[in-house]
Image (spheres, helix red, strand yellow):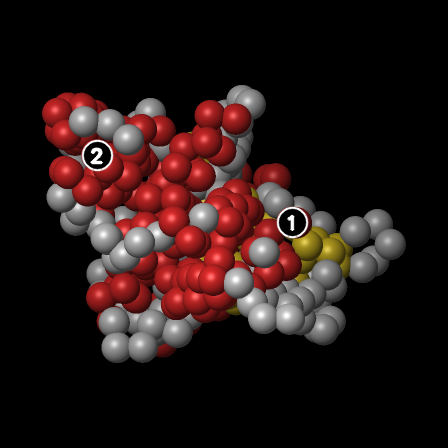
């Protein structure tokens, strides 16, 4: 049976959209702050694009059209949320994609998903957040942003001004700027941090963190500052139990940041997923630790349910599955 024009249009759009999937995921993550929610928003974006493919007339680029759909999907998700939105790390594994000859897209994805940036954006109301991202991160014109959000240009300019005033400036994210993912120096520091947990060695932790290290554990309102305070907390709350209470795996998150996935030994003696800690690393030590106690993150990083088990498959369905 011959395919209709609408069916062919849907197939063409989904095939072409595949190369934009990673950057759409990064955009949705900046909007939502959650890897799980960002993945859901991208799936919704592709589904809407599939449904309305015959309405795409090429007056704007496919990329802009998809971003418009994704932004509106994120705004809808934020409106439907109950309570405070969750914050999660974004595995670099989820950002891999066929970028071809567009290194700028890779750079924007990597730089635009830093935890410091995502945390700062969460201080903005959803629509101001969308305007700031489209205008200052993606460099869209005011008219393009207004069309994407269904508002006037003056409304966009007003929202952008309020967002800039509220944030002051976008954070630089700390750490070593321009470093490749898990470069040798940062890998060494991350490995020493992970080994200190496996050996329950508080002194080793003191030797790898900076004097002004910060520590946070979302969604708890905990915020610690300084090596003495951070290591004392970990020594009292996390390290008791001796060596081999934790087993660790080094992964990468939020645009090349080292992250330590920790498996905790349970009462039956089996190590199971416990937490993922994203590290900001400077030349002289670990500057920031953000720990996420959420076992559901492990499959997103392709990690098995037990150490040394078979790895999980990459997260996320392909564009063709959105239909």
| Quarter of the rendering occupied by the N terminus | bottom right
Q: Is residue 198 visible?
A: no
**Are the two marked residues, 1 and 2, in contact with CB atoms closer than 8 angstroms?**
no
Rounded to the nearest angstrom, the CA distance separating label 1 from label 2 is: 37 Å
Q: Position of residue 19 (x, y in %)?
A: 39, 67
At a point 49% along the width and 54% down the height, the residue shown is: 50
Q: Is residue 267 visible?
A: yes
> Which mark, by number, is residue 146?
2
From the viewer's perspective, tell me whether residue 126 is left or right of residue 217. Answer: left
Name the residue beneath numbered marker 1: 296
Q: Position of residue 167 (x, y in %)?
A: 21, 31
Residue 234 in which image quadrant: top right
Q: In the depicted view, which residue is nearer to us: 54 or 232?
A: 54
Q: Position of residue 320 (x, y in %)?
A: 55, 64
Q: Give the class, few, some or many, for how many residues have Cα within 10 Å of label 2's Cα (few <14, many ≥20).
A: some
At a point 28% along the width and 31% down the height, the residue shown is: 150
């Amino acid at each position: 049976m011959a395919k209709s024009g609408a069916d062919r249009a849907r197939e063409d759009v989904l095939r072409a959209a595949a190369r934009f999937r990673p950057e759409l995921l990064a955009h949705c993550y900046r909007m939502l702050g959650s890897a799980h929610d960002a993945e859901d928003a991208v799936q919704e974006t592709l589904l809407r694009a599939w449904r309305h493919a015959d309405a795409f007339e090429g007056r704007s680029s496919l990329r802009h059209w998809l971003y418009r759909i994704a932004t509106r999907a994120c705004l809808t998700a934020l409106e439907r949320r109950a309570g405070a939105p969750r914050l999660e790390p974004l595995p670099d594994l989820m950002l891999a994609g066929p970028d071809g000859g567009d290194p700028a897209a890779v750079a924007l994805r990597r730089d635009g998903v830093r935890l410091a940036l995502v945390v700062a954006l969460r201080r903005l109301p959803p629509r101001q957040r969308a305007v700031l991202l489209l205008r200052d991160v993606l460099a869209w014109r005011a008219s393009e942003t207004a069309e994407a959000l269904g508002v006037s240009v003056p409304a966009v300019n007003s929202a952008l001004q309020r967002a800039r005033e509220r944030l002051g400036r976008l954070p630089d994210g700390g750490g070593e700027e321009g470093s490749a993912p898990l470069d040798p120096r940062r890998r060494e520091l991350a490995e020493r941090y992970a080994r200190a947990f496996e050996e329950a060695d508080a002194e080793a932790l003191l030797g790898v963190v900076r004097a002004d290290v910060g520590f946070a554990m979302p969604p708890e309102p905990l915020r610690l500052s300084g090596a003495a305070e951070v290591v004392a907390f970990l020594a009292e709350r996390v390290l008791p139990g001796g060596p081999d209470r934790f087993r660790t795996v080094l992964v990468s998150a939020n645009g090349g940041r080292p992250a330590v996935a920790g498996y905790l030994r349970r009462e039956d003696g089996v190590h199971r997923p416990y937490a993922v800690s994203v590290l900001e690393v400077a030349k002289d030590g670990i500057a920031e630790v953000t720990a996420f106690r959420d076992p559901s993150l492990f499959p997103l990083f392709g990690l098995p349910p037990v150490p040394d088990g078979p790895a999980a498959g990459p997260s996320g369905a392909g564009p063709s599955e959105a239909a």
